[in-house]
Image (cartoon, grey):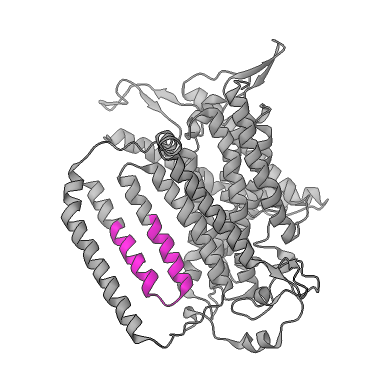
Amino acid sequence: MVELAVFFVFAAVAVIFALVVILHRNPVVSALSLVASFFALAVMYVLLEAPFLAALQVIVYAGAIMVLFLFVIMLLNLQHQREETTRPIQQALGYVFSAAFGIGLIFYLIKYAWIRAEQTTPFNSDARAIGIRLFEAYVFPFEMVSILLLAAIVGALLLSQRTDLRGRPTTGVDHPSGQNPEGAAASPRTGQPSFDAGQPSPAAASRRADPHHEGAK
Amino acid sequence: MNFDSTDIILSLVKIAIVVGALLNVTPIMVWVERRGSALIQDRVGPNRVGPFGFFQSIADALKFILKEDLIPAQASKWLYTIAPMFGLIPALTTIAVVPFGRAFVIPERIVFGHTLFAGGRLFEPIAADVNIGLLLVFALSSMGVYGIVTAGWSSNNKYSLFGGIRASAQMISYELALTLSAVSALMVAGSLRLVDVVQHQTGYFVLFNTIKIPAWNVFSPAMFLSFVIFTVAAFAETNRLPFDFAEADAELVAGYHTEYSSMKFALFFMSEYMAMATISALIVTLFFGGWDIPWYDEPATFFGFLLSAMAFVAKISVMLFVFVWVRWTIPRLKYDLLMKAGWKVFLPLAVLNIVLVAVFIANHWI
């Protein structure tokens, strides 16, 4: 009875915040709502008697990935402009396919979720049990995912590497001229150079009077 | 799960103990910090209110309550208001999984004709004895960064924003080293529960058949390195000097809480000191034997519990004083040095340490 109440409260929280994520115009609010949604999802794991997965859900998604997201969003000065639709057909197709996917998902959930719910074999979500499964039965996929992630990291490093005029790699912080390369120079909303670089560029100075985010109004 | 009313009352008592202790940490630590910094810098420090200025914190708290609560006109009001709460909640809840004393049996007792604690009941001095123990600590403490980041962003002030951005980068970097260095303590104890980690440290290392050293992890050759890494990362996680880049008074006015005033600012203040207390409790639990009293076997009674709880508090106090001591001794690093140290020194060392401890365990050296 208590569990049912907890489930419905947190299911509602998860859905509401998930809606905020896609409907709110301010990306920072969206990111924070996603964190709240992940938290509510972690409660679901606890209700399923898998506290280990709940903790991992919070540590990995809410604690690490979303902090990185927020970090990037805060650095990117995102404006709240609506892009004009240049290709209406693509937009229409997008709506159609996502609607079809959603309806299909709901259909299959309704059709099969009831049957699945009756199988109540005890699920061992002990850290030890999961570790043993992961490194015995699933060691190959596990290692493949590791390699995939490693490739992603190397790719990100390669893409973000900056070069000076002669094509030699430089780092963003210790730029030889004492001024940061273009990308990192302007801070999100103020147009001031970040990390104590030299004078602001004229473009940054003209942007200084920008109105900022949602709460301003 | 089946509860009876005694369980619920005992849980409430434990929560009251833990939260009460944690709420009192802030005023006491503020006093220790101000008097301690005065001592280190050869000044007098606050000495007007009460004996040795001990009630200065109460005066400060009153001042915080009475000050006007300003919200900057251009700030994002909602986020600006909830950011201090984001910061406070993880700091308050994390301590729940730390055992604060020796378990003891409450004997059966008859009060007004009602039998209480029928047949004796075990009192485990831990607010939430969950299987995942330390993972819950990391899950909750990783939420602490949102308070700082949200505060920095919503204030709409460039200094605040820099503070928030720096805090997020710094906390992500050092969280890895923090978690990985704690892993070795778990490997040795073979459990994620902090009760087991403490239990594992209650014995002795015997040298030359004569000298008995408490079997605390910090004295074990395999674990000393992880203690060092964990402590350094703990300083970074709590944003204390030499890692206080989120505030960095000399560069960023007051960093992420530049625009905050009154009780909202006080909440940040409280959460900083509570986070310090929590991480000190963790250091003590993981590396200094938790509530274990060296060279003394406390009885499994209420008296033994009191003694062990006092030992635990004493160890935490020493750790907290180290935090103050370091703050007024070591200057702030440069930002790029902080990142370099995190990613190129402490993270590889932490991974190396895990391998080292694994070798020790595989050979039954510890």
**Image side of residue A161 versus residue B74, left or right:** right
A69, above or below A180, in the image: above
Q: Position of residue A47 (x, y in %)?
A: 30, 46
Residue B50, visible in the rendered structure:
no
- Extreme residue in the right direction: B42
Observer able to see residue B358: yes
Residue B269: name its quadrant: bottom right
Marker count (numbered): 0
Measured as percent of width and height from the top left, residue A14 is found at: 33, 60
Q: Is residue B242 left or right of residue B295?
A: right
Please tell me whether residue A56 belongs to the stretch shown in magenta: no
Q: Is residue A128 above or below residue B299?
A: below
Image height of B61 relative to B278, above or below:
below
Q: Say left or right for B69 vs B336.
A: left
Q: What residue span does the magenta drawing correspond to?
A: A11-39
Q: Position of residue B102 (x, y in %)?
A: 50, 27
Residue A90: image quadrant is bottom left
Res B114 → quadrant: top left
Q: Nearer the viewer, residue B147 or B70?
A: B147
B32 or B256, which is in the foreground? B256
Q: Nearer the viewer, residue B192 or B28?
A: B192
Question: Residue A50: percent from the left, percent from the top?
Answer: 35, 42
Q: Name the magenta segment's main secondary structure.
A: helix
B360 up-or-down from B52: above or below: above
Instruction: Describe residue B173's horizontal placement relative to residue B140 as left or right.
Output: right
Residue occupying image coordinates x 63% and y 57%: B170
**At 47% from the left edge and 24% from the top edge, which residue is drawn?**
B302
| Magenta stretch: includes residue A25 | yes
Which residue shows up at 73% across the image and 60% down it? B336
